[in-house]
Amino acid sequence: MSSLACAALVPRAAAAQTVARPSPPALSLQDLEGMALEQNPTLPQARASIRAAEGRETQAGLYPNPLVGYEAEEINTRDPGRFKNFFWLQVPIVTAGKLQLSRDLAASHRQQAETTAEMQRLRVLTTVRALYYEALGAARLVDLRRELATLVREAVGVSGELFNVGQADRPDVLDIEMQSQRAELELIKAESHQRRIWRILAASVGNPLLPLSPLDGDLERNIPVIDREAVIARVFGESPDVRLARVNVERARAALARVRAERIPNLFVRTKLGYNAEPFASGKDVGFEAGVEIGVPLPLFDRKQGNLKSAEADVEHAQAEVRRLELTLHTQIETALKGYED
């Protein structure tokens, strides 16, 4: 066999050995949502916030630790052995149910963290769903642009043949060629837009390296009919923003109750037991002695007036925030429904 023939067979052999890459499998909306729930880093952050709030709730209900100490009295250099030695124990007495109120306040913070975590989960899913349908639309646009570019490309060939046989004028050929170039440019723009949307979608599910894949879905299938009243009722019943605002109201009320309880001071009780080495009338040591002390701060100046005023204002602010969110949701729902109907 000649060297020329061998050279001609090399490309054929290489082509025979080339294996076409399999196209990636089609991804459904459920697949993308599952990826996002597993890989989006904001969701572990939200779960960590819940665990931190649970820890603070546990800490808030713990009773204060007692104090222990040693006390020596009447120490002198003339008679070093003649002084009093005492060991004492001081126990705080928490009044007005402050521990339970602290637990209630910490529980409201935990509920706030749980609602915030649910909000973040819904936010991630909503972002993925919106980008999924946007990617579906971008893929459909690419298909339409590609079909149009193919048709115009064929029209260019037909017009060239007609021009060669004198059935078409040169301006007509130039016009169809310009249309072909315009269709090719629109196809390139559509493909670039599709890749950009896909990169955003891949990042939102937590996998920026996810390759461009076909999507399982149809934009024109199963278009729902919107029931305005049902949508409004569902949004107000399930809106995480409204739920969080209501949790904030409960948190503010719990904080107010805790501040009111702080106006009642705690007590402390101290007991001590020791040995008095001073001589008694008979010449013997006085011996063992015990004592009890009870104390309470006098709220003469600081009666938590500022904290009480601030807590009352926080409750009022939280209640007004619920109302503000409800009115804002009304506006957003009407705007969204109008855009859907139009």
Image (cartoon, rainbow, N blue to C red):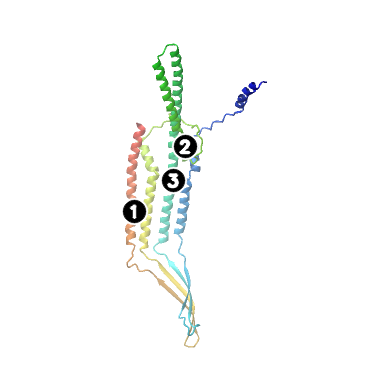
Circle number at residue 199: 2
- 206 over 179 or under it: above or below: below
Task: Check disc 3: other Cα within 10 Å, few if <14, some if 14-19, many if 20+.
Answer: some
Circle number at residue 315: 1
- 149 over 306 or under it: above or below: above
Badges 3 and 2: C-beta atoms under 8 Å apart?
Answer: no
Residue at 44% x, 42% y is 124
The x, y position of residue 324, in whole percent, is 32, 46
Badges 2 and 1: C-beta atoms under 8 Å apart?
Answer: no
Distance (Cα) linking label 2 and label 1: 44 Å
The x, y position of residue 235, in whole percent, is 38, 41
Task: Check disc 1: other Cα within 10 Å, few if <14, some if 14-19, many if 20+.
Answer: many
Residue at 46% x, 17% y is 157
In front: mark 3 or mark 2? 2
- At label 2, the amino acid type is Arg
The residue to which callout 3 is attached is: 118
Query: Which quarter of the figure has residue 234?
Result: top left
Residue at 43% x, 39% y is 127
Query: Which quarter of the figure has residue 106?
Result: bottom left
Q: Nearer the viewer, residue 55 or 207?
A: 207
